[in-house]
Image: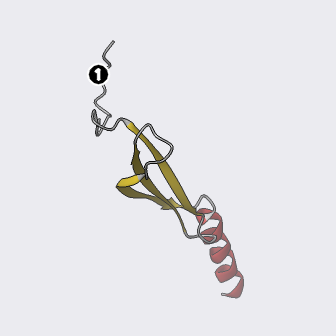
Amino acid sequence: MTEVATWAGHRDAQDPWGFASFDVDPGRPGGMTRIEVTFYRTSPSTTAAAVPVDRFVLQRPRSDSEDVEREREREAAAVG
């Protein structure tokens, strides 16, 4: 069965084995959260070294960003 996978960015028929590692930086309150993803090609072996073949970063505002902004507005209103 062949799946029509328009979402698949790459298929490596020569080396179909691999894994991804995720380095997470949760950031500071009100800031950004970052996840750096590295995809490694591996062979079906326990002795071969993994080779990094792709790397990308996912980034977005933390979910508490709105809370921090509201608190700043409250503080400014209390002072002014």
Task: Please determine whether, in this image, residue 80 is positioned above or below residue 42.
Answer: below
Tag 1 residue: 4
Q: Give the residue at x 50% y 52%.
A: 21
Position of the N terminus by quadrant: top left
Q: Position of residue 70 (x, y in %)?
A: 64, 69
Position of the C terminus by quadrant: bottom right
Q: Give the residue at x 46% y 44%.
A: 19
Specify how the rendered protein is coloured. secondary structure
Q: Give the residue at x 68% y 72%.
A: 71
Task: Please determine whether, in this image, residue 67 is positioned above or below residue 80.
Answer: above
Judge from the rendering whether residue 5 lies leftward or rightward of residue 36; answer left or right.
Answer: left
Q: Residue furthest right?
A: 78
Q: Position of residue 56 (x, y in %)?
A: 38, 57
Q: Residue furthest top?
A: 1
> Which quadrant of the figure has residue 12?
top left
Amino acid residing under circle 1: Val
Q: Residues within 10 Å of mark 1 (few under 14, many from 20)?
A: few
Task: Please determine whether, in this image, residue 3 is positioned above or below residue 68.
Answer: above
Task: Please determine whether, in this image, residue 29 is positioned above or below residue 36.
Answer: below
Q: Residue furthest bottom?
A: 79
Is 58 in front, or is 76?
Answer: 58
